[in-house]
Structures are given as structure tokens and as C-alpha cells.
Image: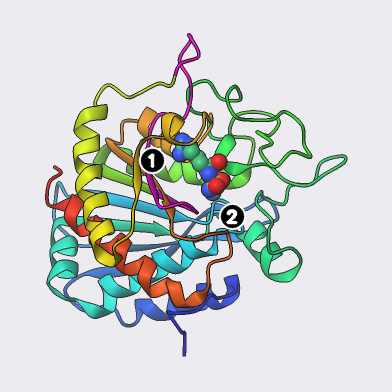
Amino acid sequence: EFDLNNYHSLDDLYTWMDSLVAKCPKSFACQVYSIGHSHLGTPIKAFKITKESPGRKSWYLDATTHAREWISTATITNIINHLVTVGDKDAQNLIDKYDWYFVPVVNPDGYRYTWEKDRMWRKNRHQFKTCYGVDLNRNFNSTNWGTDGVSNLECSETYRGPSAGSEAEVRAVSAELRRLAPRTLVAYTMHSYGNMYLIPFGNLDKNKKCLRSKDHDEVMKAVEAMAVATEATHSTKWTRGNACEVIYPTSGSTDDFAKDISIKYSICPELRGRSFVVPSREIPLSFKEIFNGIVAMEKIIK
Ligand code: 0X9
Ligand code: ZN
């Protein structure tokens, strides 16, 4: 039995995703597919929940772009499970209104490495001359790639890579986001840790000031509702706002890329935790607070 309140190896997770398809009710369709392969050739698997009818909008969610941020994969796993098998009023409403696309592990090579060798690994496992790995959240071909909060040194934890979109994982996610963008309302790329909801942009403008999107205020209204619902779940505090202002400038992030290709609600949650290693007993707490946030935000966006 797959324990939703625990962490799982990549192989166990992928097996669970396949087995969940068989439990999908008749009222909607479930499918596992691959969006591409990692640097070392591991499939990057996605799970989709769809209904046949024209003009539907979708949500895209991903996790574990950074290998050590296991709580993000555990949280997304619980969201998928809840939508497919629990079918309460909230789940039914979300599936009635939207198609859902999930990539639980964007960085499967890095994730494997955290299980087998180094729990604190962050980057992918691309081998360079002196060190391994590109920071995938610095490699997306978004505005001003390679400028802010990045390193051009291959041994750095924030190595941007040799060029924009040089990494297989980033190309796979970028292609999937581009494919889905015309009908996608929300891109939700989960990280840890810090109790934050961040929105684009991470990067600076030409005067080296934090850059807000044109619709910043409108997007913040939705994020505010999300944050309030999350905070109410277990009486916690969540910081929210422009990523560059709230934490630090970055360029080449998933959320900046998604915003650049016109996905309106592009959000980067930094999930709960006091370190990258979050005790498994907090998995159900993370799921509940994040799911409540999604339910609350859904009510006010279109
Ligand atoms: O540095 C990062 O990539 C993120 N923090 S983490 O601890 N998960 O590594 C923050 C990214 C903030 N910028 C954007 N979301 N654009
Ligand atoms: Zn991260």
C-alpha cells in the first residue's frame, strides 16, 4: 500500500501514479504520460485529469524542481489523490470546471540522488568539468535569463547553466507549458520552504528595481484569498507578494517563464518547513493548507 503520509522513492511514486489511473471514476479521465526525459534519460511523468467538453481551461502544477524539496512532491501527490479518489464537493467542483495537469517530480535525477547519496542535493545531475548540476529554477528562458540571483560557475548552487533552456528538464517543462498555455489559467510551481506565496517577476528591470507584472494587483487579490485560506487552516502565517521583493531577485525561474507566455496566475508557493527536511507527519498538514488555498482562489478567478 502506498502511504500518502510518507515520502516515496521515484520508482514507488511512478508505480503509484500508474495504479491510480485504474481507480479513476467514470465521470472523468485520468492519464499518466511523459513530458520528456531528464538529463540522464529518466522519464518526467505527468498525471492529467480531464473531461471531454470544448473550451475548458486548465491548471498546471509541478513540484521538486529542486531535488531536496520533498514536501512539494508529497503535497502534489495528496492533491492528485484527493481529486481522483475522495471526490468531495470541492474536488468535484474543481474537476467540473477545469482540466488538471500535474508534474510531481520535475527533477527526477536530482530526486533519486537525494534518496541514494545526498539528501541536500538541489540541482539536476548534469556533469560538467569540475562539478555536477544546473539550478533548474535559474535555467528557464524567461526575460533577462542569467542576470539576477544566478551564478555562471558550475559549482555554484545557483548555476544558471551554459545557456537559457540548456537543461533537458527545463526544455520538457517549457514545452509542456507552451502547449498548455493558451488554455491555462494557473501555473503553480511548488518549492520549499518558508510559508510564502510568490508571484512574478523574480527578475529586476533595467534600473535594477524589482519588476512587477502589469496585472500585479489583480493577481494579488487572488493570491490574497489563497493565503488567507491557507493561514486559517492551521493558524500559520504566510508571506505573499512579488518574488523579487519578498525573497531576492532571481532570473530564469519557472514562474517568470509561465508569466512571460501569458499564464495569468503564475504562482510559486514556498511550502511549510523549518528546513528542507520536513517531518512526514507534516505532509497531511501541508496538503490541507495548500488545498484549501486552491479552493479559495478558484472561487475568485476566471
Ligand atoms: O531560490 C529559489 O529558486 C527559490 N527558493 S528555494 O529555497 N526553493 O530555492 C525562490 C525563487 C523565487 N523567485 C521566483 N519564484 N521567481
Ligand atoms: Zn526550490
Q: Which residues are magenta?
A: 189-209
What residue is shown at x 24% (from left), y 26% (from top)? 215
Q: Is residue 135 left or right of residue 155?
A: left
Which mark, residue 55? Answer: none
Horizontally, residue 93 falls left or right of residue 171, namely: left
Category of crowding for the residue at label 1, using alpha-carbon neighbours closer than 10 angstroms: few (below 14), some (14–19), many (at least 20): many
Q: Is residue 192 above or below residue 16?
A: above
- Residue 298 lies in the magenta stretch: no
Can you see residue 49? no
Q: Quadrant of residue 26?
A: bottom left
Name the residue at 30% across, 63% down: 289
Q: What label does residue 198 carry, if any? A: 1
The numbered mark at residue 107 is 2
Q: Earlier in the sequence, mark 1 or mark 2?
A: 2
Dominant secondary structure (helix, strand or loop) of the stretch shown in magenta: loop
Task: Rate crowding at label 2 as few (under 14), some (14 to 19) or many (20 or more) other CA atoms within 10 Å.
Answer: many
Q: Which quadrant holds residue 301?
A: top left
- Secondary structure type for disc 2: loop
Dot 1 beta carbon under 8 Å from ligand 1: yes
Question: In this rendering, would 237 be left or right of 247?
Answer: left
Residue 8 visible in the picture? yes
**Labels 1, 2: front one:** 1
